[in-house]
Image (spheres, grey):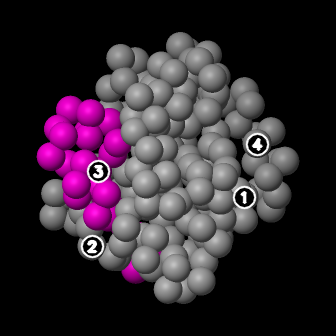
């Protein structure tokens, strides 16, 4: 584990821990407030993210930004990362070996940020962070506490593009996060 951002970011620059490195254009490490009280974790970069080297900048990210604006969440005050840092081919779900290769980077990000709340965006984030026994359909919208961190599993914004009905639940989940952050006077 690395004790500072510079060392952590340098450690991933030439990462070849899994086969995802073979086709990447950019490593999508994460972005946002490195002292954030709230962290969002998604699955992995898509084509737009791979091209720009930033998380959630494509259609799903634009949808998430609209939800943030509507609820009063400042993207600049949160930190956003993914389970894997390189784009899986054809935006497929990261394979177990790929996710496990990147998890130490993500764990180190969490250690350095010290968030109070982590929003898990989708099944891949939920299962890789809290455990394979969790299912997004049953865990979504419910607070889960582990090691003094509150987790809020919700739909991945890409799922909202496929199923409009999930937008309402996503919105409600983000409102719960906002209410908790406001109640606890968190920097949001």
Q: Is mark 3 on a helix, strand or loop?
A: loop
Which of the marked residues, 3 or 1, is nearer the chain's N terminus?
1
Q: How many neighbours does mark 3 have within 10 angstroms: few (below 14), some (14-19), or many (20 or more)? A: many
Front position in the image: 72 or 137: 72
Instruction: State the residue position of label 3.
Output: 155
Quarter of the image where the N terminus is located: bottom right
Which of the marked residues, 4 or 2, is nearer the chain's N terminus?
4
Front position in the image: 46 or 162: 162
Gap in Å between the C-alphas at discs 3 and 1? 24 Å
Q: Please provide percent x and percent y for residue 142.
A: 27, 73
Asked if the residues shown at circle 4 and circle 2 are in contact, with their CB atoms under 8 angstroms apart, the answer is no
- Tell me the tag on residue 9: 4
Q: How many neighbours does mark 2 have within 10 angstroms: few (below 14), some (14-19), or many (20 or more)? A: some
Q: Please provide percent x and percent y for residue 164.
A: 18, 40
Any part of residue 12 in sight: yes
Which of the marked residues, 4 or 1, is nearer the chain's N terminus?
4
Front position in the image: 73 or 4: 73
Does residue 175 lie above or below 82 as drawn? below
- Tell me the tag on residue 142: 2
Q: Is mark 4 on a helix, strand or loop?
A: helix
Foreground: disc 3 or disc 4: 3
Is 109 displayed left or right of 3 in the figure?
Answer: left
- Tell me the tag on residue 88: none
Q: Which residue is drawn at 32% across and 26% down?
A: 92
Asked if the residues shown at circle 3 and circle 2 are in contact, with their CB atoms under 8 angstroms apart, the answer is no
Q: Residue at x 53, y 31 (%)?
A: 57
Q: Identify the image quadrant of residue 169.
A: bottom left
Q: Identify the image quadrant of residue 133.
A: bottom left
Q: How many neighbours does mark 4 have within 10 angstroms: few (below 14), some (14-19), or many (20 or more)? A: some
- Tell me the tag on residue 34: 1
Which of the marked residues, 2 or 1, is nearer the chain's N terminus?
1
């Amino acid at each position: 584990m690395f004790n500072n951002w510079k060392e952590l970011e340098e450690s991933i620059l030439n990462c070849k821990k899994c086969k995802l490195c073979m086709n990447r254009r950019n490593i999508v490490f994460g972005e946002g407030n490195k002292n954030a009280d709230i962290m969002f974790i998604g699955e992995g970069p898509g084509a737009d993210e791979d091209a720009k080297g930033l998380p959630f900048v494509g259609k799903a990210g634009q949808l998430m930004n609209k939800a943030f604006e509507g609820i009063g969440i400042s993207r600049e005050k949160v930190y956003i990362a993914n389970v894997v840092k390189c784009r899986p081919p054809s935006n497929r779900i990261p394979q177990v070996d790929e996710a496990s290769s990147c998890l130490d980077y993500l764990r180190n990000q969490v250690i350095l940020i010290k968030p109070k709340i982590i929003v898990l965006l989708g099944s891949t984030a939920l299962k890789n962070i809290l455990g394979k026994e969790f299912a997004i359909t049953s865990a979504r919208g419910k607070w889960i506490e582990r090691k003094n961190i509150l987790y809020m599993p919700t739909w991945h914004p890409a799922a909202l593009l496929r199923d409009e009905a999930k937008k309402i639940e996503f919105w409600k989940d983000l409102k719960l996060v906002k209410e908790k952050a406001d109640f606890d006077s968190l920097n949001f």
